[in-house]
Each structure stands twice: as structure tokens, then as C-alpha cells.
Image: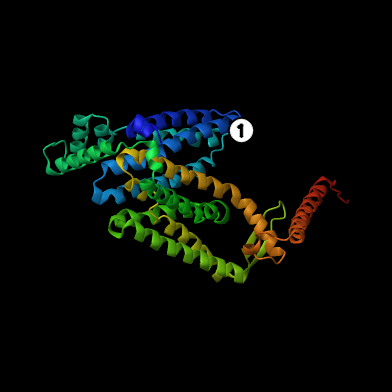
Amino acid sequence: MFSGDRFGRRGTIIIGCCIWFVGCIIQTAATGVPMLIVGRVIAGICIGLVSSAVPVYQSELAPPDKRGRLVSLQQWGIDWGILIGYFIEYGCSFIKNGDSQLNFRLPWGIQMVPGVMLLSGMWESPRWLAAHGRYAEALDTIANVHAGGDISDPYVLAQWSEIRAQLIQEDLEELGFMSIFQRRFWRRLFLACSVQMWCQLSGINALMYYIVVASAVQYICFVCGTVPAIFYMDKWGRRNAWICGGILQGGSLFIIGALQGAYGSVSSVSTNSTTVWIVENNLPVTIVIIVFSYSFIIFNAMLAGWTYPTEIFPLAIRSHGIGMSTGTTWAFTFAVTYFTPPALNTITVLFESGIPAWKTKNLPIALQMEVEALAEAQRRDVQLQMNEAETKKQQPLHIEN
């Protein structure tokens, strides 16, 4: 949030890459879980820096009529990274070399390769250069990006005039970090953060992590689903993309829920306390549920969550605004990921007791006790099954002559 204005967009990305290398090295050399966690935390700091700096960097270099397309490429790049990472991990799982740890250390080491690629061939944002008085460098950057180095190109001169006029206006207004909380900007901040929040609360991460079986299919869906946004985002508009994607996502969830409610039932995994909702002996319904589950993922990729916040803040507070909206993304990603398992388990218990999930607020004390008793009984049954299975394993094997 602050490094983007102090060190520049390019400088922040470089700092993030250096932190990334440190995190990857620690993960690759990890001798235990604590060391691995430290490496993950350090790498996560890089993700926070880079994910807030890159959208700003792209939006300040891109022509206005292609900005949506180019910022959408960031999401597409993330989707490709996830897909390639999945296949790298899948391929490394087949490494069988005695007691070698190469099969899990190699993927952590390969993470450094994109960081090396990211460090090469970047100009600094011309808008940041101009805001810090480096006018000649800013003009050269605009010319190199848009006109092959020709500073007399009409488009280059028009962009330079626009940047200068914007800087003069912002200097008169004396905008700083606290300005983002002023009344004239609070609505922009609310929109930027709420867009990212609702993209996560749509349930995409819950669906990917806990409901849809992890496979290359869902990652391919993400890659394919982002393509329409790349080509049509600037034609459709951001708002139309939200409306279209939201309606399609909601329709997919409605169909999935209706079919599961009509044809599914609660079941449990005998080896642990996991409860699941399954559809048995009905192949057509199962196929439709799977199709709309993956369709939901595709429709989520159409949303303009990363594009919109880069376009609504003035240059002086753009980095702060993007930083807060990106922080909102990761905060709600964590919340959805962390709270989904206990939420699913609680909802299952309530369904078994005949209580609709939407009527659980302010339950009477007697009803709360009944729900807790049902949950405890379920845990005892599962534990009893596990004990019986363990006892059978320990019984000696008798062979009759």
C-alpha cells in the first residue's frame, strides 16, 4: 500500500520478487513443518506486495481503450500459473527415487522461475515518474511503450499532456493517504473493496477447495472462463460483466442446490468425522450437477474484480486504494477457506435435526442443546466405528490346519 508510492510500481514488484526468492529457498530447504510455515509466510508477503502493485502498474501503462483487456490478462496469468503448478506437482508425485525428497522439494524450487522472469524487461510507471518530478524518464517511457521511442508521436504527446494536467489538479488538492477516507472518496473505496469482497463471498473458493474434487478440470475452466473477459471487457463495460457473471453464477448455484435437495442425502465417511451430501444411483442428475459446478467456476472468471478498482482512484491515492481492495480480497479468501469446513458440518447437523439452516439465528436454549447433543452423538458414533476398526486390525490372525 505504501511501498507503491515510495519505491514505485516497478520497485515494489522487484522488492516482492526478492522476498519471494527468500521464501522459496526456505520452503525448498525446509527440515520440518515450522520452517515450511516460515517460508510460506515470507512468500505470502510477496504475494501481498505484488498483487497490489501489478494491477496499478498495468493500468498506468495501458491505453485507456485497452485497459480492461490488459488488466484481465493478470487474472488469466494467475489462472495459467495455477494450472501449470498443478501439473508440475502432479508430475513430481511420480518421482520415485528411493528415499529422495525431490518429489516435494522440486515444486517449491521451481516457484522461483516466474520470479526471475518477472524481474526482466520492465519500465517504471510513467505516471509515478511524473509524480516524482522525473519528467524526461516519464516521457521516454511513454514513447518506448506506445510509439517505439518516438517522443513526437501525437499519442505520446496526448498521454503526456493528460498526465501533466492530472498531476497539477492533484497537487492543488494536496491528496495523501488519509484522503482516501474523505467523504468524496469513501464511496470509491467502498466500491473497490466490496467488489473484491463479493467475488470471494460468491463461494468460488469454498467450491474449489471443499466441494469440487481437485483436478485439472477446474483450473482449465478458469483459464477458459477468463478469455471472454480479455476480449470483451472493454466492450461490455465493468458493470455489465458483474451483472452477467452474477446472474449466471446465481443460476448455477440454484440448479445445483435444487438438484441436490431433491435427489441427494447426507452421508458420512466411515474413517473420520467428515460428512458429505451425495447423490446416489442417478447418473443424469450427477452429470448436470458436475456441469453446473464447473460452469460456476467459468462464470466467476468473467467478473471484473481486479479491473474496476484500478480505474476509480486518482493517481495520488491509487496505490493506497488498490492496496486496501487487494487486502480485502485476501482477507475474505482466508475467511471463506477457514470457516467453510465448520460451517458445512454445523449445517449438516441442523439438517439432520429437521431445522432449516436459515432459521438458526437466535435459537432457543433448549433447541441449541438439542443440536449440540446431536453433534456429540454423531462424534461418538464415528469414534466408536474408528475404535472397532482399530480393534479388528490388532486381533491376531488364526489359521486353521
- Tell me the quarter of the picture where residue 237 sits: bottom left
Residue 277 position within the rendered picture, expressed as x and y whole percent measured from the top left: 63, 62
Residue 330 position within the rendered picture, expressed as x and y whole percent measured from the top left: 49, 44
Left or right: where does residue 154 sit relative to residue 28? left
Does residue 311 appear anywhere in the picture? yes
Left or right: where does residue 204 sit relative to residue 186? right
Residue 153 position within the rendered picture, expressed as x and y whole percent measured from the top left: 12, 41
- Crowding at label 1, few (<14), some or many (≥20) Cα neighbours within 10 Å? few
Above/below status of 292 relative to 186: below
Q: Residue at x 56, y 69 (%)?
A: 258
Q: Residue at x 28, y 41 (%)?
A: 60
Left or right: where does residue 6 sit relative to residue 94? left
Does residue 116 appear anywhere in the picture? no
Q: Number of marks in the image?
A: 1
Foreground residue, 157 or 291?
Answer: 157
Above/below status of 256 relative to 392: below
- Tell me the quarter of the picture where residue 299 sits: bottom left
Residue 143 position within the rendered picture, expressed as x and y whole percent measured from the top left: 18, 37
Residue at the disc numbered 1: 33
Foreground residue, 54 or 134?
Answer: 134
The quarter of the image holding the N terminus is: top left
Q: Residue at x 38, y 49 (%)?
A: 188
Foreground residue, 59 or 395?
Answer: 59
Q: Amino acid at mark 1?
A: Val
Please, what secondary structure does the residue beneath circle 1 have? helix
